[in-house]
Amino acid sequence: MGDNRAPVTVIGLGLMGQALAAAFLKGGHPTTVWNRSAGKAEQLVKDGAVLAATPAEAVAASELLIVCLSTYENMDSVLEGQDEALKGKILVNLTSGSSDQARATAERFAGLGVTYLDGAIMITPPGIGAESSVLFYAGDEEVFKAHEATLKLLGGNTTYLGTDHGLPALYDVSLLGLMWGTLNAFLHGVAVVGTANVEAKAFLPWAHGWLDAIKGFTADYANQIDLGDGKFVPTDATLETHLEALKHLVHESEHLGVDAELPRYSQNLMEKMIEQGHAKNSYAAMVKAFQKPSA
Ligand SMILES: NC(=O)c1ccc[n+]([C@@H]2O[C@H](COP(=O)([O-])OP(=O)(O)OC[C@H]3O[C@@H](n4cnc5c(N)ncnc54)[C@H](OP(=O)(O)O)[C@@H]3O)[C@@H](O)[C@H]2O)c1
């Protein structure tokens, strides 16, 4: 197995790097691995991986290099002194970082003759290899396409976002922000109904149904925002109607002794936007509270 598949090197064998290397092995790719703590390669080596003794050996072993370390700074230190060896390689960086770091890294590698793809993994290690798992990539489209089948071993929903290397990081944090915002609102709701001895499990099906409804609202709002005419015509409820409902949540929270900071934050934002003339607009107008003033 693996004779006709392109060799892959995985640098970084934390929880995620081990899962990535295992997926390449499973897909039949000759896989070379390197990690600062070599012990983490033990199972992979049993499964057929080759353990490189140094980062230089790891870089030399394959044209396609996958890096997954804790930070970009650690990637720089691991690859220090490898500029010549990296020339002509394809480096796919799945380390989480900022869009600035991704763009600066792409520029630096371009200067070294390295083709750089930046990526973001939207799944935890057990999800690596699953059909529904999402991984984002950006960089040279032809290079991405040439290696798409190999990268798809990591997740069926492997998506190319474009040539701007900063995009995976921006999608990554924006989706994580959506997760934390939603989770906090869910947990706040659990706390509110919990004051009446309602179990979280009883609240759950209503929360799930409500999340589906919210998906519908966001589809409408995305259209209104992208129209760019600043009209935000309400098809469901105006911002002032939202504000009145929200005040009940603030009141209930304060009255019941549940932390009210989260709904109060929303109240402040809504009042600010209403002061700016958006009372009769849809909730989508709230995007103005978040956007850069020039947007
Ligand atoms: N785990 C997830 O669910 C998940 C999901 C999406 C994205 N990611 C991203 O994937 C990346 C790796 O995450 P992980 O979960 O694998 O983290 P992890 O288990 O903590 O592994 C961190 C990796 O970085 C290496 N490292 C740390 N400091 C280093 C240094 N100074 N020099 C050389 N190597 C160093 C570690 O080497 P040692 O083994 O020697 O310590 C290890 O290979 C992160 O950027 C993370 O945000 C993770």
Image (cartoon, rainbow, N blue to C red):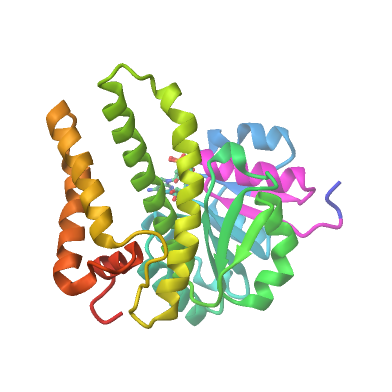
In the rendered image, the vertical position of residue 5 relative to residue 15, given as above or below: below
Query: From where the camera sits, is residue 80 visible?
Result: no
Residue 286 is drawn in which quadrant?
Answer: bottom left
Quick check: 207 left or right of 263?
A: right
Direction from residue 199 to residue 83 in the image, left or right: right
**Residue at left offset 73%, top offset 44%:** 25
Quadrant containing the C terminus is: bottom left
Look at 60% across and 77% down and name the residue there: 140
The reply to whether the magenta stretch includes residue 29 is: yes
Residue extending farthest to the top is: 197
Percent x, y for residue 41? 60, 37
Q: Position of residue 42 (x, y in %)?
A: 62, 32
x and y, in percent, of residue 211 in the image = 47, 44
Q: Look at the picture and state if 190 lies above or below 239.
A: above
Q: Indicate left or right for 103 with 64 as reference.
A: left
Where is residue 122? Give x, y as percent. Answer: 52, 50
Whether residue 22 can be seen here? yes
- Quarter holding ligand 1: top left
What residue sits 35% from the left and 73% below the top? 232
Please provide the residue range marked out in magenta: 4-32
Q: Is residue 273 left or right of residue 38?
A: left
Between 125 and 279, the one lying in front of the other is 279
Residue 72 falls inside the magenta stretch:
no
- Picture quadrant where residue 202 is located: top left
Above or below residue 295? Residue 201 is above
Along the line of sight, the residue nearer the viewer: 277 or 12: 277
260 and 117: which is toward the camera: 260
Picture mark count? 0
